[in-house]
Image (cartoon, coloured by chain):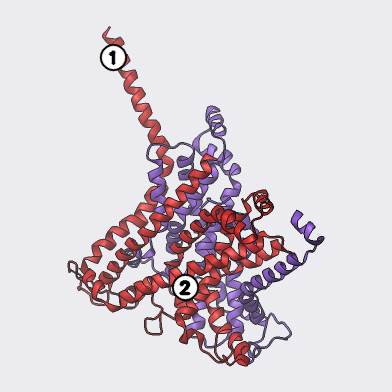
Chain colours: A purple, B red
Amino acid sequence: MRAGVIAGGRFPTSRVLWSVVGWLVVLVFFFPVLWMWLEALKTEPQAASSPPTIFFVPTLEEFQQVMSGDFPPFFINSAIASIGSTFMVLVLGLPAAYALAVRPVKRTRDVLFFFISTRFLPFAASLVPLYLLARDLQLLDNIFALAAIYTTINLPLGVWLLRSFLLEIPPELFEAARVDGASFATEIWRIVVPLIAPGIAATSLICLIFSWNEFFYAVNFTSSVAATAPIFLVGFISGRGLFYAKLAAAATLASLPVLLAGWIAQKQLIRGLTMGAVK
Amino acid sequence: MSSVAGSGGARIQSAASLARRDAWLRRLPLLPAFVYVIVVTQIPFALTIWYSFHSWNLLKPGSFRFSGLDNYARLLTDESIRTAVFNTVLLTISVIAISVVLGLAVASLLNSEVFGKGLMRTLMIAPFLIMPTAGALIWKDTLLNPLFGLLPNLLTPFGLGRVDWVNRYPMATVVAVEVWRWTPFMMLIILAGLQSQNPEVLEAARVDGANAFQAFRRITLPLVRPFIELGALLGSLFVVQTFDSIFMLTYGGPGEDTTNIPFLLYLVAFQGFNIGQASAIGVVAVVLTTIIATVALRTLFSIFQVEARR
């Protein structure tokens, strides 16, 4: 700042120059998203014209078509799988994180290491047996089975993240609660949950992002009844020909929840993505 | 006399059992998550290893039989697995290397005195948040399509029009789309590192006559190095598993040009229903990933320990 003042007032040339460079770079990265929105606001002929239409009167026609068509069930399935699995991660993960952070026993580090290592076990490790199990139990194309798989994917990250937040709470707080005779459930519900509300938010955000965008299990474990939003998009490469405006509208709607959540909770996003390492 | 000794013994015993009870009570909250993870990841993995020693095609009932190391032997001789390993390595290394460099550049820009930093960061992270299938579709159909896509139309005046990028440069296209997605991730992590830097140190270096490049290389870079490592390692664990964009952009083709290990697994397991072979690929993938993950976790632990010491 001081260097800037010396170099030439509040708006030194270098600052303007770097701002222009920065904005150019950012707009290059953001452009595909913007283009997706623009295409979604066009009519079908405008979207499939060559050269592309730049000036046009925006219309919500394609959004209406997508929403009144067969898209909503896919969207609802995505919501069930993401919210359901996030809830399960919190229910299973919070007590585990508490045990690891507040009342550690011998080998806590090993348990922690084991948990997080399962997050990076490639899906190749368990894919085939899980598929066969789901098939034999008639759980293929079942949204709750998909939610159960997403719980597994996110649980290690959830435990690790929640633990990193719990470690920041002074242990005396838990001691005091226990001396006052609080039961374990009370301790979790009345003390832990309010204290690490930001941690729960960060964990939920990361779980929602990963399960909402998940594609591999969705494409292999569901077909029609339980198919999620990304599966709806697959329809545009295989069957429905070149409906660009509709494609863009569907892509916009499918991406919207995660985009909004990530934008609102940017701080939690960084912490969550780095598993708590970056605050 | 004996009753006193007895009660003393009981007290010692009860103290020991209390300690044991306490230890179990401490472990109890861990148990549900622990059991869940073991049931859904470890037991299936054991089964994957078991299947990998068998020949089994789901489309041929009764074809399940022990085949020893046949599946692994086939992996060694099979052309497509070698191609897939090569493609996985190529994709991962290029995506991580390019997105780290770009991420560092963008993070440095966002860390300097530019106008509208907050909005820049907000727009910048959008590619990472967009559903990967949606992003790939937008790239393929509306940006790169040789006829209607924006890019070929923009490049026509330069004699590059009507190039079918996805088919002519399939791997480069996949890399480009993945770089577009992962640069924001790297940028976020590296930016956090840059922001933890004390600006006075840089100021002092400037006063001591260091130019911007020297200051960056000698002061900033060593400071953000752990953040770059963290981003690169976490990123590579995800990029190794790239499936969505390959499925949407190239479907592994043309030929096997963009088939990586996850996509090959998908083809063998769900298009060929060759359970034994798919399991062997799974085991190999686990071994390869474990190598990266071990390094990643060590880095993570060392960062946590540095934080704990502070």
Q: Is residue A118 above or below residue B115?
A: above
Label 2 secondary element:
helix
Kindly report which numbered mark, 1 or 2, lies closer to the viewer in this rendering: 2
Would residue A184 be visible to someone looking at this image?
Answer: yes
In the image, taking residue A185 as reference, residue B21 lies left or right, namely left
Q: Is residue B182 visible?
A: no
Amino acid at circle 2: Asp
Q: Is residue A245 above or below residue A82?
A: below
Corner quadrant of residue A56:
bottom right
Q: Is residue B255 left or right of residue A279?
A: left
Mark 1 is surrounded, within 10 Å at the Cα level, by few (under 14), some (14 to 19) or many (20 or more) other residues, namely few
Residue lying at 48% horizontally and 62% vertically, measured from the top left: B235
Q: Quadrant of residue B15?
A: top left
- Do marks 1 and 2 share a subunit? yes
Give the left or right position of residue A11, taking residue A221 as reference.
right
In which quadrant will I find the N terminus of chain B?
top left
Left or right, B63 with reference to B177: left
Nearer to the camera, A119 or A99: A119
Q: Which mark is residue B6?
A: 1
- The residue wearing badge 2 is B244
Q: Name which residue type carries label 1.
A: Gly
